[in-house]
Image (tube, coloured by chain):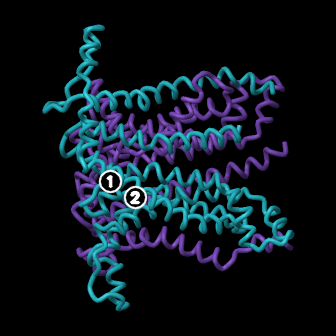
Amino acid sequence: MSGRLTFTRPARLAAIAPYLWMLLFFLVPFGFVLKISLSQTAIAQPPYLPVFDLSQGLSAIQAAVAQLSPDNFKLLISDNLYVLSYLRSLAVAAVSTSILLAIGYPIAYAMARLPPQWRALAMMLVIIPFWTSFLIRIYAWINILQHDGILNKLLLALHLVSAPVVWLSTDSAMYLGMVYSYLPFMILPLYATLAKLDPALLEAAADLGASPLRAFWLVTFPLSLPGIAAGVLLCFIPIVGEFVIPDLLAGSNSLMIGQTLWLEFFTNKDWPVASAAAVVLLLLLLLPLALYDRLQRRQLEQAR
Amino acid sequence: MKARAVNTLSRFNLVSLALGFAFLYVPIVILVMYSFNASRLVTVWGGWSLRWYGEFFHDQAMLEATLMSFRVAATSATIATLLGTLAALALSRGENFQGRTLFSGMLYAPLVMPEVITGLSLLLLFVAINAERGFWTVTIAHTTLTMCFVAVVVQSRLSSLDRTLEEAAMDLGCAPARAFVAVTLPLILPAIAAGWMLAFTLSLDDLVIASFTTGPGSATLPIRIYSEVRLGVKPEINAICTVMIGLIAVMIVIASLVSKLSSARDENVAPL
């Protein structure tokens, strides 16, 4: 007990540097996003009209507040392009996350039942792709899916198709890329919960006459819910804002919001609209982010 | 007897494992294999060859981007490891200090925050303070992202540590700082090393945040690869990707060896 008390002050000191860093480079920048989302587009460098000029005191702030305009947000709501890309992002994330859960759960479940000496190897096999670049792993699929790629060659050789199938630039390719890229994010938290499960619970269920399937449904599944929640949030939140995967694998006729934001920023150089798009995206993610934060906090408290 | 019955793998379990790992690895294996393909056509097998590696090592722009990426990754990983370790210590050893909720929230949010948002917001900050965009802006951006991963890795190691060790050291008259250096630090060193390597590879891999925060003339390797990939598959890109995969594999093996060594040492320490 004495140890905990004496460590408190140094721990507080330890927090100072990372705290200031995150305030300056994570929290404060959101203020700039909000500010620029409310300013007018200008053909200049940087391409927006300044909103605040603090050097001129209070009157300047009042003048600046009067200049703030919700025009960019009105544009986002009135333009079908943006509304559709928000809806599409949410739908793609929901579908991808469901597929990920359906595929990831059996894998994590099997890993948790491996003999202990094999578990470390299985963990490593899941972690290696997690460390490997998204870009490289998507590129690997482009190799396979392209017009004269291996998949089409295989299908032709097996006489399953008579002409090469168009795989690239389709939604199927995009979902494949999403599932492939995010699978480790789904498996790892599921595995962590399932591996901690006490096998005695299943034995007890079996002794009481439950069939294995019923025991799974009544014991394993409910106890793995925290892992499911963690895996779902770890996949859903970043997928909503995903850029690389839809950009390289999906067709260009319907965009996800990450792509729309990227286009507004890099191609149209419309920073205020891109910022407004980021603000709306953040608002959409507020609820899942809050859930995720609660989950992390609970785990942190349990670990302490 | 019964315990074993519960723990045996059913056929369904084995099939899910086999299919799952095949799904994860077959595309990477194909990519690596085709990087050694002699043919210019990516899809025609023309025998084994190293010519695309030679091409990569003569591509000045690619080499410059590689150098830039390594400089950013090494610098940002080092700062991130320092800050992330401090953050982990504060989270797991500090009782409720003021602003702790905000602190942990800011550390966990970047792990899932869509990269387009992180990238855009940092860029707007850099423009607002008139920072010249290039090496340092990308490095700061990557540090901000990767220090959160370091904090998670180190914090999970700290929470699995037996705290009575520190307490014993202090009961024997060690000052807290000394107890930390003599007892805690050696025990979490493997996690700190693993955190550094994770931060390094995450920085090396990042495309989106780097695209927002870099300036003209300082493209990182993923930015270059991305602009090539958009134009289609090129055998040279397969070679570059294979080099990166090999590098990451080596780092993971080192990281797991380091943690294995340390857990072996733990077993000797624990009964003490």
Q: Amino acid at mark 1?
A: Met
Seen from the viewer's position, the closer of residues A140 and B33 is A140
Residue B17 in picture, x, y percent from top left: 59, 72
Evaluate whether residue B221 shows in this view.
Answer: no
Callout 2: SS: helix
Residue A24 tag number:
none
Q: Chain of mark 1?
A: A
Residue B45 in picture, x, y percent from top left: 31, 81
Q: Chain of mark 2?
A: A
Residues at marks 1 and 2, CA–CA distance in whole angstroms? 8 Å
Residue drawn at point x = 69 percent, y = 77 percent: B10
Q: Mark 1 near mark 2, Cβ–Cβ under 8 Å?
A: yes
What colour do you see for chain A?
cyan
Q: Amino acid at mark 2?
A: Val
Callout 1: SS: loop
What colour do you see for chain B?
purple
Residue A256 tag number:
1
Residue A92 tag number:
2
